[in-house]
Image (cartoon, helix red, strand yellow):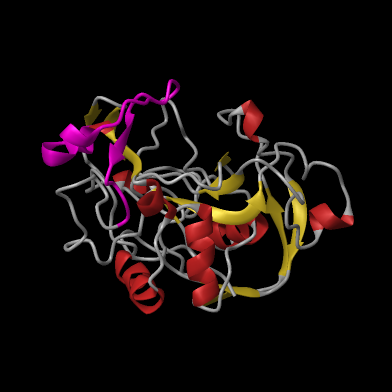
Amino acid sequence: MVAVPEGPFLMGGDDPDAFPDDGEGPVREVFVSAFHIDPKAVTNAQFAAFVKATGYRTEAERFGWSFVFAAFVTGEAAHRVLNASVPQAPWWLPVEGADWRHPAGPGTGIGDKRNHPVVHVSWADANAYATWAGKRLPTEAEWEKAARGGLRRARFPWGDEFTPRGQHRCNTWQGEFPRRNTGLDGYLSTAPVDAFRPNGYGLFNTSGNVWEWCADWFSADWHAPEAAHTRRDPAGPGTGASRVMRGGSYLCHESYCNRYRVAARTSSTPDSSTGHLGFRCVA
């Protein structure tokens, strides 16, 4: 793990491209105590060690299905698509037998992806792994401070330009979403957890690749008022319907979801599991 020093940082953003309902702002000074964080997202190999040691079964395994991006549903998996849909995101297909071991459904595996982030893990799955490892999930404030890598008000972990000197610095959708991905950044799906350059604290892939669960319940406005509990080691509201996700994924594209910006945020219900959602831990 890498150390993140205590101290204040400017959290949130006022980007004109932000989604109004996400509650990225206001930009505010937040103090965060020192902590350690995984430099990389938890890998398939690490999660496999947890499962071997504990016999844990993920929620996707217990439910019997999970969401897979439509372009990846081929072969045997194409015959296992359930009769359901996501109206706002028709590119997600519920596939019977999709889980962390079978990221695109039956007939697929992780043999060549041991160093890729584990996916199809719910918030409870991530929390169970963190507890087993003697760690925990990061608060949203911890995640953002670490993701910024010491930079002040930058849009991305490396600065304000998305592709400095024409170089890709993260794994996101290239082309026209959702029909054509050119793969110009080198990847059509997940990338190894140590792909691309680390940020100033030594963290890899805090933009793109996979969304990462945080400990906090989600609220669009809980953090807005100036108060001790929102400005010093904030831990989010006490209850909620969904948990915070940060960082964006390989499916994010500026045309519909530019949430690979470091201030961007969204949420999902705690039992959600998809092929682009993972996590990292803190201590």
Q: Quadrant of the C terminus?
A: bottom right
Seen in the picture, residue 48 relative to 223 is either above or below; the reply is: below
Percent across and percent down for residue 158 are 47, 54
Residue 201 visible in the current orientation: no
- Residue most toward the top? 87
227 sits left or right of 237 in the view: right
Residue 54 visible in the current orientation: yes
270 sits left or right of 238 in the view: left
Q: Looking at the image, which is closer to me, 194 or 47?
A: 47
Residue in the image at 15% along x and 36% along y: 74
Percent across and percent down for residue 265 are 58, 42
- Residue most toward the right? 227
Q: Looking at the image, which is closer to me, 70 or 282?
A: 70
Q: Which range is magenta?
A: 71-100
Residue in the image at 42% along x and 30% along y: 254
Q: Choose top left, top right, bottom left or bottom right for residue 56.
A: bottom left
Percent across and percent down for residue 63 are 40, 46
Q: Choose top left, top right, bottom left or bottom right for residue 140.
A: bottom right
Percent across and percent down for residue 231 are 81, 55
Q: Is residue 87 magenta?
A: yes
Q: Is residue 237 magenta?
A: no
Residue in the image at 36% along x and 24% along y: 90
